[in-house]
Amino acid sequence: MERSPFPHHGPLQPDQVTGREQLAIDMAQRIADRRLTALLGPRRYGKTSLLKRVAADLEAVGHQPVWIDLYERTSIADVAATVDRGLAGAVGPVRTSLDAIAGTFSLNLGVLGVQLSRAPKQRPDPVLTLRTLLEVLTTAAQRHSLFVVFDEFSGIANVTGGAAVLRTELQHHFQEIGIVFAGSEPSTMQALFSERTQPFFAQADLVEIEPLTDDAISRIIEEGFEATERGAGAITSRIAAFAAGHPQRAMQLADALWRRVDRGGTAGPLAWEAALAGVRASVDAESERTYVFLPLGQRKTLRAVAAESSIYGTTAALLDLPPGTARDAANTLTGNGIVHRRHEQLALVDPLLADWLRRRFAI
């Protein structure tokens, strides 16, 4: 069977990441220059895929990555086990050095999770172990050109003392090791680096991953269709308009359309309508779950934004949405990455959630 040129499930392979060329160059330069950077953006916006592309580009010129995923970590022990897995995931001479350095501390990389599952008296101290693992990392960085990606770094906010331990052990090595923090909860990420009470206050440049431009989406779709001997025709502009810059949703829609066009054929309105209907059917339940678990004020605010990109307009009045409630709800939804500002107006990040709201609650 022919493989779709529009993968959209999970992080992409480095050679599949397109439309972010300038940002990839910028991030690579920041890492090479040892400039701490926090990459912010909503979920499914391609942060991890972009950083995998950057990592591959840097590996090609001698830099070695260590990848540490802090998604939903809840304790120091959890973080220590994650750092251990990250160090154990290194390859080549770097892994050899890490193992040798860890051996001087009587550590075996990759087994901490097992050790922490033992009876309480037999477990290693998680704080001391985390500090030691970070010392192993920084020592290796003095011997190799290393960089670390702390993915889903907003998870550290759930770990009491976690950010403080990382800052304490890393702060004297910022010139020796490239560090990138990536996170999908904008308000939490902003707070981690912008609030004076936080250990990483003012320690990193904040870079936001922007929506893809309509031109970038159209180019990716056209090239994917052409590479598989198909034509996208004028439908590329419809997908770009509908996706509103959302990378994953754009590729999901393009994939659904591609599967309805035979080799040698060109996409038309009927294929597009069928593709859109199929994607809607696959995500409507997800959209409803997202909506129903929100408080009433936030649900009303989402409906107002989806209808007219405003929380103070006619829709808000019809929904009996007070301005104060709307303002607070909009701030919360923006901080959670459900709403953002696009072209100076509020908009839902997920175009399919916005589409579901307009179809389900037409006023």
Image (cartoon, rainbow, N blue to C red):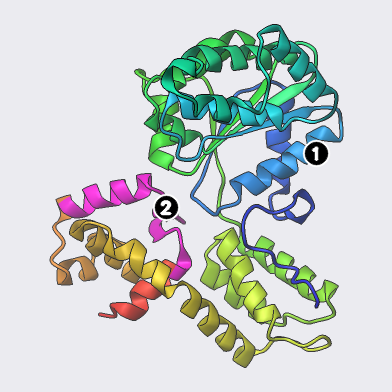
* Residue depicted at 66% across the width and 48% down the height: 49
Question: Which residue is identified by label 2?
Answer: 341
Name the residue nearer the viewer: 265 or 67.
Answer: 67
Name the residue nearer the viewer: 54 or 120.
Answer: 120
Name the residue nearer the viewer: 109 or 320.
Answer: 109
* Residue depicted at 78% across the width and 24% down the height: 95
| Image quadrant assignment for residue 272 | bottom right
User: Residue 221, how many percent across, how many down?
Assistant: 71, 70
Would you place residue 60 above or below residue 241 in this image?
above
Quarter of the image with the C terminus is: bottom left
- Span of residues in magenta: 325-352
Amino acid bearing label 2: Arg
Left or right of residue 72, residue 299 in this image:
left
Which dot, 2 or 1, sits closer to the camera? 1
| Image quadrant assignment for residue 192 | top left
Amino acid bearing label 1: Asp
For marks 2 and 1, give the CA distance: 31 Å
Question: Which residue is identified by label 1?
Answer: 57
Left or right of residue 114, residue 155 in this image:
left
Mark 1 neighbour density, 10 Å: few (under 14) some (14–19) many (20 or more): some
User: Residue 291, how many percent across, how many down?
Assistant: 31, 64
* Residue depicted at 82% across the width and 75% down the height: 226
User: Residue 57, how many percent across, how many down?
Assistant: 80, 39
Magenta stretch encompasses residue 341: yes
Mark nearer the N terminus (2 vs 1): 1
